[in-house]
Image (spheres, helix red, strand yellow):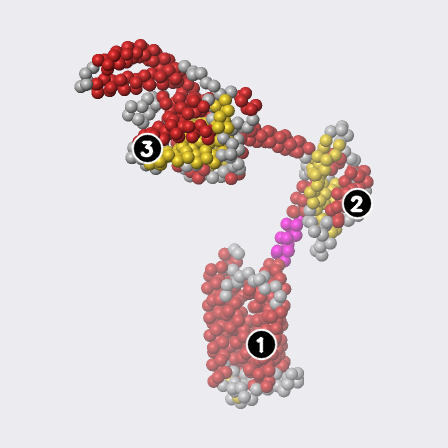
Amino acid sequence: MDPIERQRKESKVVIYLLLTCIAILLINIYQTPLHTYYHGLNQATLHTLLELFSIFACFSISSYGWQAYNDTKTTNYLWIPSIFFAVGFLDLMHTFTLPGMPYFFGEASNAKTTWFWITSRYTAAFTLLYLIFSKDRASTVVKRGWFIFGTFLYVGLISFVIFKFEHQLPILLNDLGPTVLKNNLEYSISLILLLTIIAVLIKYQKTKNTSELDLVLAFSFLFISELMITLYNAIQDINLIFAHLSKAMGYGFIFKYFYLSRLRLSFQQKYEAEVNLRKTQGILESVFLNTPDSMIILDPREHILRANEAFYQLFQLSKNDVVGRQFRTIVPEYTHILEDFTQNICTRQEMDIQVLELNRNGNKQYIKMSLFPVKNEHGHMMYISLMSRDVTKQIEDELRIQEAEQDLKDTIRLQQGLIMKFRKQNDRFILTLCDGAILRVFKVKPEDLIGRDLFDLVDATTALILFSNLNEAWEGAETSYEINLFNRTFFGTLKPVKRDGVVVEVIGSNLDVTKLKKAEELLQKSEKLAVVGELAAGLAHEIRNPLTALKGFTQLLESTADHSNKPYIDIMLRELDRIEMITNEFMVVAKPQAVKYQPYKLEQLINEVVSFSSPQALLHKVDLLVDFKATNSNVYCDANQLKQVLINLIKNAFEAMPNGGNLKIELVQRQHDIVIRIMDNGIGIPKEILPKLGEPFYTLKEKGTGLGLMVSYRIIEAHKGSITFDSEVNIGTTVEITLPLLVNDTNMLYA
């Protein structure tokens, strides 16, 4: 409100209160003439009229509060109907029990009417104080039956007590006027009203709501009424009538606060609602006419009531052929749509239909329809709103996008390596895409990887390599790396994805280069073997000629040497034999040996090797054990070469057990092949040495050449088999030789 208008309202309140105080002063100054005039009036009638006015105000406020709760749903309006009904009812009983009133509910008396007056005043004072101090908040109470029941129980109980125990109740009024008890009760009510006035003034200072000033006046007049009641001496005292007049004025201002001000607000809200409704109707009309979507309104019998321009254009119709006609006669293709909609109208509030039809040019046309029921306040359908839109281009675009997405997914899925995309979040790299054929090989689902942190996907070493390269790519550089995943070697590249010059993602591709790496290793080994072969051939040729002469002359010297020189000659001959043995190994490496493949039982071959090796086992304090677990041990092989491999491996095992031990040879049959397993409990081989076994000149022996194991590898590979080593230091070594089984004689042709 305007500050000037608020000041005027405040001034009126002050004037009303000043005039009231002046009136009270004049009444006490001119008591005698006023009493004379007042005695000539009908005091009972005047008293009754004033009380009826107050009662009317209370019942009106109660009725309004009951209706207002349906809109406000607040706690104050939940209590107002009960409070003012109780106050109005007790005031009504006070009026009906006044001496001189007609007989209604029982015999009238001063005791009854005074007690009804006191209970009414206390009810009003306490409950109004509660409403002022309590915070108005939303209420969840829908059915107010218990409040009605409580109100009737309250007033009924008070009425019963007053009527039943009238003579047992304390005396409030005697022949001399109000008793001390009654005046004290009135003073306590006045104190409560004074507190209420102070609370309303404090509230007004905060809200500056001028309607609160009506409450200030209301509680002020009720306060004055209570004070005036304490001053009267008899029922004919003019102070009593002025007290009732003040009370009536107090309830009048309460009535104004709870009714007139709210009613004005209701009218204002209604006017604003009508204005808003007209605006909304104008907006809806504009939307209906100008929307690019086709819109029509149908009645329950499917007659078209209204249609916009877009409808005529979409279905190529004229206005004269549409309004008033049934929808199914104009667009018969959509008859089933309305039937389905009306059948499901109870369970569905709307229905979207996508219809495929052929237009006049024979091309496919997609039209999406939406139907909405327009219902009245009882939930019955009054109209049907039908909206249509040509979505042909949208659906065709979606189909093209879906095909492109599917092609891209298939391309990524069939990629032999791995495609990955990362996004950086809080210094962490999150996987946003991961797919490729390698995932299906290891039965890993892409969706199980998406959204996870880099360090949750791979081991710490691999993650650090990737993290370093991802950081470089995030800074805008293209990087490459080599990592091990799934026991395979991958070569990867990372490229930044930029938008507006800022890196938003990093995309990477990983190719499986395991076979390539193995092929490279085999090529390097082949090159070494070729070099070794050439070197061996040259060395063997150069060594054999002088070796033959040395050995021959040494043998001649042995026959003529004296006894003291004979030990030295024996040593020379042994060393010459060793040189000859090494030369022969060189020749095996240098040129292919003549081999003869034929069926052979491995059990027999192993027994021959064991018989040959048994003396050496005794010398090395080794227990040699044999365990055959095969029913078929036939293989197609060169027996001498396999014996050479086994003797070489057994010899290595003896040398690995310098203090003796156990050497076990097992023969295990499998479905298509057979395994020779040689197990010792010697000093073992370090893990880092195992991958280098078989390379020429690589050996752990002090006087070894590494050529024996290399030759063993070549022999087993020539027999279409494999040889593997498994060892732990100070525990032992296990060598497995796998050879294909000979099933029938036709397998002999493979050699």
Residues 624 and 428: in front is 624
Estimate the spatial distance between the alpha carbons at disc 2 and disc 1, rounded to whole Å: 60 Å
The reply to whether the magenta stretch includes residue 269 is yes
| Residue that appears at 33% across and 36% down | 661
Q: On screen, 172 above or below 204?
A: below
Residue receiving disc 3: 618
Q: Residue at x 63, y 81 (%)?
A: 96
SS state under label 1: helix
Residue at x 74%, y 34% (from the top left corner): 357
Residue marked by disc 2: 303
The quarter of the picture where residue 304 lies is top right
The boundaries of the magenta stretch are 267-278
In the image, which is nearer the foreground, mark 2 or mark 3? 3
Residue 435, image x, y percentages: 52, 33
Give the alpha-carbon distance from disc 3 to disc 1, as whole Å: 118 Å
Question: What secondary structure is marked by label 2?
Answer: loop
Left or right of 698 in this view: 334: right
Mark 2 neighbour class, 10 Å CA radius: few under 14, some 14 to 19, many 20 or more: many
Where residue 265 appears, as percent x and y from the top left, is 60, 59
Tag 3 and tag 1, C-beta contact below 8 Å: no
List the residue tagged with mark 1: 154
Indicate left or right for 548 with 513 as reference. Answer: left
Q: CA distance from mark 2 to mark 3?
A: 113 Å
Q: Is residue 240 visible?
A: yes
